[in-house]
Amino acid sequence: MLARRLQRVAGGAGDPPELAKTWEGARASFAQELAPHFRVEEEWLFPPLAAAGESRLVERALEDHARLRDLIDSAPTIEIAIAFGERLHRHVRFEERELFPRAEALLGLPVLEAAGRAAVAARKVA
């Protein structure tokens, strides 16, 4: 939803006050939802996935996380909003279609359950 909202606002007339308001909302959503999600993946999911031989997937996910963090810390321009929205959309699809199915296939239930518990705890803290 966040990616689509940014793409819609940025693709519209480019109204600066609307873009600024939407960008501030995006920053808040990032801090409350995405940043904790990224930390859980980076701590609980990526190390065992890399150890299982999926370093390519982990590297791509880490690159996406770093780029999204850089973009959200940028000034709210139409180009930045579009880039963030597109990158976030592609990242979510990558996780859904490649990363998570591979993690489910390779990692044991205890690892996946621990990651799930950490994700729930991160949501409560944020």
Image (tube, rainbow, N blue to C red):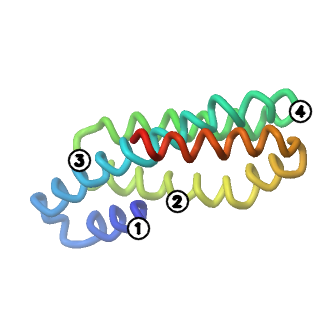
> Residue 8 placed where, x, y %?
32, 70
Q: Earlier along the polypeptide chain: callout 3 or callout 4?
A: 4
- How many labels, in total? 4
| Mark 3 surroundings: few (<14), some (14-19) or many (≥20) residues within 10 A | some
Tell me which corner region of the image, top left, top right, bottom left or bottom right, holds residue 57: top right
Q: Earlier along the polypeptide chain: callout 1 or callout 4?
A: 1
Q: Is residue 81 above or below residue 8?
A: above
The kind of secondary structure element at disc 3 is loop
> Residue 15 placed where, x, y %?
13, 65
- In whole angstroms, how far apart are the C-alphas of marks 4 and 2? 26 Å
**CB under 8 Å between discs 3 and 1:** no
Indicate which disc residue 4 carries.
1
Indicate which disc residue 20 carries.
none
The kind of secondary structure element at disc 4 is loop
Q: Which residue is mark 4?
A: 52
Which amino acid does the dot numbered 1 rest on?
Answer: Arg
Q: Which residue is mark 3?
A: 76
| Mark 2 surroundings: few (<14), some (14-19) or many (≥20) residues within 10 A | some
> Residue 109 placed where, x, y %?
85, 45
Q: Is residue 40 toward the left or the right of residue 21 in the image?
A: right
The kind of secondary structure element at disc 1 is helix
Of circles 1 and 4, the one toward us is 4
Q: Earlier along the polypeptide chain: callout 3 or callout 1?
A: 1
Residue shown at 37% from the left, 57% from the top: 82
